[in-house]
Image: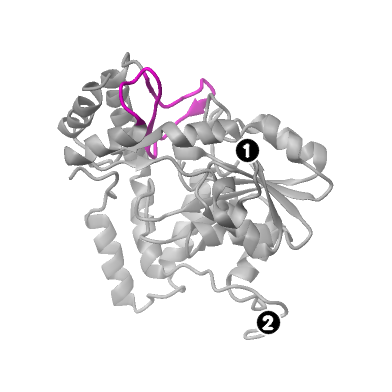
Amino acid sequence: MIPVYEPLLGEEELKNVVEAVKSGWISSLGKFVLEFEEGFASYCGVKHGIAVSNGTTALHLALSSIGVGPGDEVIVPTLTFVATANAVRYTGADVVFADSETSTWNVDPKSIEQKITSKTKAIIVVHLYGHPVDMDPVLELGRKHGVYVIEDAAEAHGAEYNGKRVGGIGDIGCFSFYGNKIITTGEGGMLVTNDDMIAKRARLLRDHGMSPVKRYWFPEVGFNYRITNLQAAVGVAQLRKIEEIIRIKREIAAEYNHLLGGIEGIRLPPEEGWSKNVYWMYSILVESPYKISRDELMKELAESGIDSRPFFYPIHTMPPYFKGETYPVAERLSACGINLPSSPKLSKDDIRKVVGVIKRYG
């Protein structure tokens, strides 16, 4: 079966892991952790990188570092992976959902504005499937209302908004390095920021809240969110090839666009003029007058040996968050969206096979 995703790993990653093992530094201390943090922060154009155990802990740590807690509200797009909302719940704050834009599939700044109250402490935007959010209107809302803007860039390493890489645009950027992300450490994540105080607090909370000047003294409750030197060793090697991976993924997207263009009912992924989409997933919408439904197309792909994924379910429809609310754009996108094989290992023959199945009903 052609998988939805496979990481691009090679000899550099193996060499670094072997070096870490031979050094004896395999847990959260070791040279690769600092090298990965500094390298990734530089790549994002920010001063600070704080490596953590996964993308979810990066989000939770970001929220905790700015003091989000019970009584606060955090605005989150409903069309995203559930971790974005769960991280808010971990703090005791309330999740407030916003709807999506039809054009970019990302959170709609107008919907965000409608949800801001005196209790709003932060806005989390998600650069969905590799396309950046229209950040200027969101940043303006943050300044106007005195709330933090956090970028969930788990799916968008290297994506650009007006020439600036995501993660370094808001107050804090959060990344995931899960096995299917643009670069991976297996599990792992990163918080990036230009704010010295946020970075200082994030480092404190990441390591159980231990005092940096008095070892084994804990002035407050923190978390064990550290990354290992083994994971960071992989990350250092991955970071060296990130631009090559993005180049390959954009070439794959261009080939899909060329072959799928003009099929009635198949809507291709967006790339606004102010953006650079890194196409973490090559995502399409299956709409009328296409001859079969999204789910039927996924079944046809599977029967032809091709894996695929539906879009995320809107979080407001799930039992822990269901309040009877309606977000029509997100619901429609979720119902007709499909993620096609998007691995940097994908060949042109693979792409042609995928497209061949889609063209049967177009």
Q: Name the side, left or right, on which 240 lies relative to 35.
A: left
| Residue where numbered disc 2 is placed | 218
Q: Name the side, left or right, on which 292 lies relative to 164.
A: left
Can you tell which mark lies on residue 55? none
Can you tell which mark lies on residue 326? 1
What is the x, y in percent for residue 132?
53, 34
Front residue (pair 100, 109): 100
- Asked whether 309 falls inside the magenta stretch, the response is no
Total marks in image: 2
Q: Residues within 10 Å of mark 2 (few under 14, many from 20)?
A: some
- Asked whether 284 falls inside the magenta stretch, the response is yes
Q: Residue at x 28, y 76 (%)?
A: 22
Quadrant location of the N terminus in the rendered image: top left
The magenta stretch is 265-293
Q: Say whether residue 58 is visible.
A: yes
Q: For mark 1, give the secondary structure.
A: loop
